[in-house]
Amino acid sequence: MADPTPAIAVTGIGAATPLGNSFGAIADALAAGRSGIGRYDAGTYGRPQEHPAAAVADIPSPPAHVVNLPPGDFGRRSRLEQLALGPAAWAVHDAGLVSGSQQAPQPNRIGVIAGIGAEQLKDWERDYLDGGRDVFSPADRPTLVQRLATTLGITGPTTTVAAACASSGFALALARSWLTAGWVDACLVGGCDVLSPTALAAFHNLRALSRRDDHPQQASRPFDRDRDGFVMGEGGVFFMLERRADADRRGVDCYGELAGVGMSGDASHMVTPCSDPTEAARAIAAAVADAGLPAEQIDYINAHAAGTPVGDAAEAAAIRTALGPAADRVPVSSTKSMSGHLISAASAFEAVACLAAIDRGFLPPTINLDAPDEACRLAHVPHTAVTARVDIAASNSFGFGGANLCLVLKRAA
Amino acid sequence: MTAGMSHDVPKNAVPPGACLIRGGQVITVRRSEIADLARQPSPAGAPTLPPRFLRHADEQTVVGVRAVLQTLAETASDATDLAYDAVIAASCRAGQPTAARTMVALKQQGPVGVTPHVVPQCSLHSPASAVSVGLGMHGPTIGVAGGPAAIAEGLLAASTLAMSLAATQPAAAIWLVVTGWDTTPVLDDEATPTTDPTCRGFALRLQPLTTSGPLPESAVLRIEPCNTRESADRPAADPPLWEFCERLTQGRATSIGCGRGLTAVLVPGELGFGVGSPTNAREAA
């Protein structure tokens, strides 16, 4: 019989983010409190469309021993696909599970799950801006995740998961269940998203984006009294997950374990964040319980906090509700102050931030937190990173439509 | 590696993720009928949604919500507490007409012309969120798929979520909502539809089974790992949505490959899922 609750280990990471393209680079940026946000022009048809945003400077090509693409092939793929394929291939490499190697499971025992919230919208937009007509009469073609699996030679189960800004977190939750059930022996899981004129315009018109256009690096200020919205970012982050026992048998190092998952739904509104913290608190409490831990043992919380007036205050209340008195001392920060909001990839990126805190022994800061809002009273980590031992970290993600998710990550024993 | 070793299940035991099918409905609607349906989505005997709740919703969302409401109407005698139910919506190219209108508006008017509803109402998660928000369900709410394997990905995601729910909210159900077009609407340069295809969907109300009991022979969804090389080499194929819906209404079992590693097996049994054509039914009434 399968172990009903096997430990699930992170054995590989690949990334393309505004703060760097590797686990080490991201950890360095977070420890230094460096902002990846700048001025970004998404203009189309000769009209400027400037916003503070966090763009990826260079997307890493896949390593040739993982994916042997013809010359120029990677560059011809859409930016969204590059932000999936590059990081995914590097995660395979990092885990040492290159297809055909002795250690790799059979291709049909590897799964692929990606959190991508609006793949078709991004594809149609790119095609339309290039003069195409796909949105008027769409072609029937495989999804990005299916193409990703084909490119990597993986034939196991695949799926795309969407829960708005919590998409890649839900992808991780599903991957953990696939491994727990014994449906796969390894799962490539993560998420990606891309800056786009339509998404920027939609969120701007919704008044959800920060309007600090003249000072982009100060625009993302979660929990601050003067926050005025989030800063959109882009990126791709993928993990290789395996059952810990399998990873140990292979003799590979683990970044940490995905120890707990909690999920709930606000059922409040399709667009507006829910100001009632009840359901978000239930997701946090469920994740902590799933990890088999008392709340007092959490060493760090990476908040969803995107810098919106309603959302940050509701999350602070949710953390206080879930943790009780422990909320007065458990350090909380929002790395979106540095990375911007990577939308579908945000959960996965913030899981990397938690693993970096565990690995390097520091609390990532919330930069720009000059005047903490009284409505967001928490044990903040303002401005600069703090040296601390972190064994257990929780990461919150909340999406449009009220999708709430909390992940608990812990040091591999 | 432990391929094939970690998922041995005793014969007749409930495998991980198995669900009992507690109800379901199949819905077909012409594109031209969806606006009316959005204004009046609830059939007799179903809960009422907030006024104008679906006014910004994508066509597939409207059809998915109606399939859930129709299922609730058919099971009205079964006292239903939806509070902790979860929703999974698997759609195929949802949001296309709104996306097209948005692209045209961006070109003609610039960023100011882009509707703020395009992301929250026309993304992959939107049908699931609409069911959850409209009916007050506080379980997990996600969208899956987006492409031609929507049925397989939906069944697999439902079974996946069933494992979590069985452990944390054993009384809660999972609503699986799958929607798609028989043929995708063709639009002109102003994003006005020039064809009137059928939008089809089904909703299943699934009850996670605990692993301690025996596995029922019918009215179940289960996932079977492919342990042999032969099954691993078998090509995965998703039937068209119309064919799958037809099999559901006929009570015929269907197996669908989820990649080459897993197979989703749905056995509807004698439930006899009705086929609703909501607008016609309303006019007849």
Image (tube, rainbow, N blue to C red):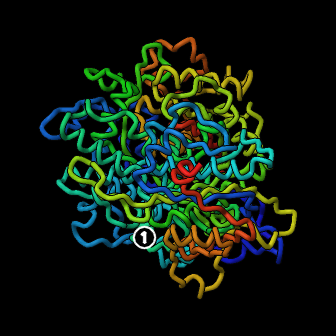
Say how many tags the image has.
1
Q: Amino acid at mark 1?
A: Leu
- Residue A393 as seen in the image, left or right of residue A92: right
x, y percent for residue B143: 53, 51
Q: Which residue occupies 66% across, 47% down?
A: B86
How packed mark 1 is, by other alpha carbons closer than 10 Å (few <14, some 14-19, many 20 or more), is some
Which quadrant: the N terminus of chain A?
Answer: bottom right
Q: Which residue is mark 1?
A: A152
Vertical comparison of A31 with B3: above or below: above
Q: Which residue occupies 26% across, 44% down?
A: B103
x, y percent for residue A378: 61, 20
Q: Secondary structure at mark 1?
A: helix
- Residue B278 as seen in the image, left or right of residue A216: right
Specify the farthest residue to the front.
Answer: B284
Q: Which residue occupies 65% across, 36% down?
A: B136
Q: Nearer the viewer, residue B104 or B5?
A: B104
Q: Which residue occupies 82% across, 62% down?
A: B211
Tell me which chain the residue with mark 1 is part of: A
Vertical comparison of A329 with A287: above or below: above
- Residue B181 as seen in the image, left or right of residue A289: left
x, y percent for residue A244: 67, 60
Specify the farthest residue to the left.
Answer: A46
Image quadrant of residue B82?
Answer: top right
x, y percent for residue A115: 49, 51
Image quadrant of residue A38?
Answer: top left
**Does the image show residue B7?**
yes
**Does the image show residue A361?**
no
Specify the farthest residue to the bottom.
Answer: B230
- Residue A180 as seen in the image, left or right of residue A188: right
